[in-house]
Image (cartoon, helix red, strand yellow):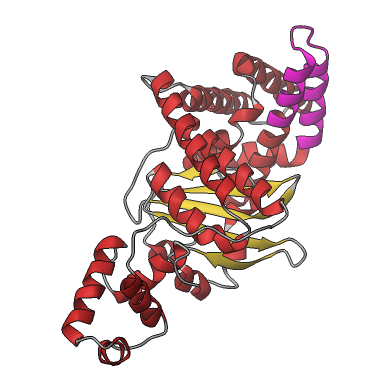
Amino acid sequence: MKKIDFQYLLFYKIHRSEILKNSMVRLENNPEIDKEQKEKLRQFISAFIAFLMIQMKNTKIEEDALHYWVQMHSNDMPITKSNTFQVIVFDSFKSVLSQLHHPYEEELLLFHNELLSKVTSLYLAWIEDPPNSIDIKQDYMKKLDAFSEILIQCNGTEDLPYLLTRTEEIFSFKRCIFLSYNPWLKEFSGAIGEELSKVQLMRGKIESEPVFSLKKPLFLKKPDPYVQQAAIELFNLSSIIFIPITFERQLYGWLTLDQQGDTFDCSKLQLDVLEQVGIRIGMYLARKQMGVGVKYPLDLTEKELGILHLLSEGYSNKEMAELMFLSEFTIRDYIQKLMIKLKAKNRTQIISRAFRMGLID
């Protein structure tokens, strides 16, 4: 079957222009499809052929790659016209194939039909509403509203650490990282989040991650093949969500959300909501900065804040005790309280989480 895979992809590579043109003519001449549906189907068919061209380097169509492609382009397919897509692309392929008397004509037609059926099945499975979808949707909308309220309070890039922390809390993720993108240099210029030091280790390599060329929201149940193995190991990745941050076609960067090594599921409904988060952050970054940024609403005493700032400057317990006129035992007690309040495991995490919450800068 691998030979037919390759022959199929090779045929598409050679005759993609004729197949695409044939498909567009059939689509345009179909009186049962309205203008808006035609535009969506044009995008979906064009993207499908582009996907096959990418698969050419593998000499076969990867199952996971097909699944992720369907997920990313599900909004380009009119729900009621999934069968129309299948018929148009099958007939267009068959028409071009028949004219050439290809030696594998029968096998290629069978493979083509099975592939289109699989695309349709994956599409219908992805867009299927989960049980209790009305309640789930209402819950997601409440979370999106809560996120929007936080966004209104924030101001500019200085509040992004705080915003990321609240995003984790509202949408129940253990880790949220913002990767900023420089459109003029076409490279990632920095990162905000708990894993900043690890992102810096990957500097110069992040741009080559395949996922960043997609420019669409993507949920990866398994990070292969869109994330390099080095990044998977460094960040302890299992499942992960990528959300582009855009505004008026300007790409500001990407938001990644995951559970720090734990595998999880994500529905289309959830991904659509998180896409809105990305759009709203893009609008937020585009707006004029004004006023003073917000601080994380955490109840810290004056002494705890003082010790927090000294910790961030690298002072030892002994040095802090002398400066604060306290015993080292009391300093250790304060540090323990900070760990509890900030949900940190050690001194390093205290500083990292305090930075992200906007408590220190």
Dividing the picture into quarters, in which one does residue 10 lie?
Answer: top right
Q: Nearer the viewer, residue 101 or 171?
A: 171
Q: Is residue 70 left or right of residue 315?
A: right
Residue 17 falls within the magenta-colored stretch: yes
Q: Is residue 145 left or right of residue 215?
A: left
Q: Nearer the viewer, residue 138 or 96?
A: 138
Q: Position of residue 127 (x, y in %)?
A: 50, 24
Q: Position of residue 222 (x, y in %)?
A: 41, 48
Dividing the picture into quarters, in which one does residue 341 lie?
Answer: bottom left
Q: Position of residue 221 (x, y in %)?
A: 41, 44
Q: Residue at x 70, y 18 (%)?
A: 88
Magenta-drawn segment? 15-44
Q: Position of residue 202 (x, y in %)?
A: 52, 71
Count of marks overlaid on the render = 0
Vertical placement of 142 versus 262: above or below? above
Q: Nearer the viewer, residue 300 or 342?
A: 300
Extreme-top residue of the structure: 32
Q: Residue at x 59, y 68 (%)?
A: 190
Q: Is residue 54 left or right of residue 129?
A: right
Main secondary structure type of the part rendered in magenta: helix
Residue 31 falls within the magenta-colored stretch: yes
Q: Is residue 218 left or right of residue 97?
A: left
Q: Quick check: can you spot residue 162?
A: yes
Q: Quick check: can you spot residue 55?
A: no
